[in-house]
Image: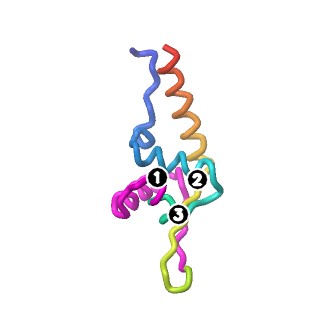
Amino acid sequence: MSDFKDLDPLLHSQLRLAVMSLLISVESAEFVYIREKTGATAGNLSVQIDKLSNAGYIEVTKSFRGKKPLTTCKVTKKGIEAFENYVKTLQTYIKK
């Protein structure tokens, strides 16, 4: 099994992988949209977004729409590379 590459543990989480999969296909997404699409609780999603942001995989922008807080997430170049590497690594598992 030593010829298998390790999967990125940050992306191996189901919710973080779902967030990245969503963000890869859009320019940016609001927190509420991501929560609706993933079915995650606001608290859990917030924690996972923080982990992705701290790793440099996504960029988080906090602003206001009127008086309501607005959090927008956008995948970074580093995040795209990490996601593509994760997919390539998964493909090596499937081919063996």
Q: Please say if 11 is above or below 26.
A: above
Q: Quadrant of residue 10?
A: top left
Q: Please say if 42 is above or below 12.
A: below
Look at label 2 and name its amino acid.
Val
Look at label 1 and name its amino acid.
Leu
In three-dimensional space, the C-alpha distance between marks 3 and 2, rounded to whole angstroms, equals 9 Å
Tell me the tag on residue 75: 2
Q: Which numbered disc, 3 or 2, marks the residue that appears first in the sequence?
A: 3
Q: Residue furthest bottom?
A: 67
Q: Which numbered disc, 1 or 3, marks the residue that appears first in the sequence?
A: 1
Tell me the tag on residue 81: none
Look at label 3 and name its amino acid.
Val
Q: Which residue is mark 3?
A: 60
Residue plotted at (41% across, 38% down)? 12
Q: Which residue is mark 1?
A: 52
Span highlighted in magenta in the image? 36-64
In three-dimensional space, the C-alpha distance between marks 1 and 3, rounded to whole angstroms, equals 9 Å
